[in-house]
Image: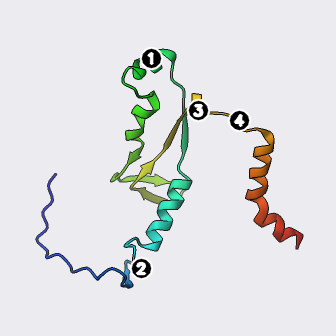
Amino acid sequence: QISISLEPKKKRAPRGTLITSSTEGHNRSTMSGGMRPLTEYRRRVQARFTPVVTVAASPEVDAMCGASGLSFVDMLRPFCDVRGINVPIRTGAEFSYSLADFQIRLHSCAEARQPPSDVADEHLNKAMAPWSAATEG
């Protein structure tokens, strides 16, 4: 599919200029780095809450993939980021939205490990610190 646009290119503002415009009811801003704050926030949230799938491969599959220097998970990773799809999703009788992008993260069972309990407790305490300080004071 080839797309040709006959519209002239719009001039861009010089770097360091704050641009604010209203498009489709959303307020969008561009800072000096060129990345819109809302877009950057959305990218971080999506990366943080991407579904994780654990992959278990048989020894035969690992041996076949090992000949190429890649693991089975490495061979699947290029297919984990799907862009430009338009799939309607219904979350209830009244709610539906269109899924345009989908991403998953893959990890091998061989990479799975349980951290020592003291490390897990320390991580949990750090994660819960904002809420435990609020309830104490």
Residue under label 4, please give it.
114
Disc 4: CA contacts within 10 A as few (<14), some (14-19) or many (>=20): few
Element on which disc 3 rests: helix
The residues tagged by marks 4 and 2 sit, at their Cα atoms, a distance apart of 43 Å
Going from the N terminus, do you reach mark 2 or mark 3 first? 2
Residue that label 3 marks = 111
Q: Are marks 2 and 3 in contact (CB under 8 Å)?
A: no
Q: Amino acid at mark 4?
A: Gln
Mark positioned earlier in the residue sequence (1 or 3) = 1
Q: Which sits earlier in the primary sequence, circle 4 or circle 2?
A: 2
Disc 1 target residue: 63
Q: Position of residue 105 (x, y in %)?
A: 50, 43
| Residue 29 circle label | 2
Q: Inspect the image, locate mark 1, and give the three-letter code of the amino acid beneath it.
A: Ala
Q: Secondary structure at mark 4?
A: loop
x, y percentage for residue 61? 45, 19
Which of pointers 2 and 3 indicates the residue nearer the eye? 3
Query: Where does the image place residue 67, in percent across and percent down from the top left?
Result: 38, 20
If you read the primary sequence from the N terminus, does the residue marked by circle 1 or circle 4 appear first? 1
In the displayed structure, does residue 55 sit left or right of residue 14? right
The x, y position of residue 77, in whole percent, is 42, 38
Residue 47: assigned label: none
Q: Does residue 123 lie above or below 130 as drawn? A: above
Residue 95 visible (yes or no) = no
Q: CA distance from mark 2 to mark 3?
A: 41 Å
What is the C-alpha distance between the residues marked 1 and 2? 51 Å
The answer to whether residue 41 is left or right of residue 31 is right
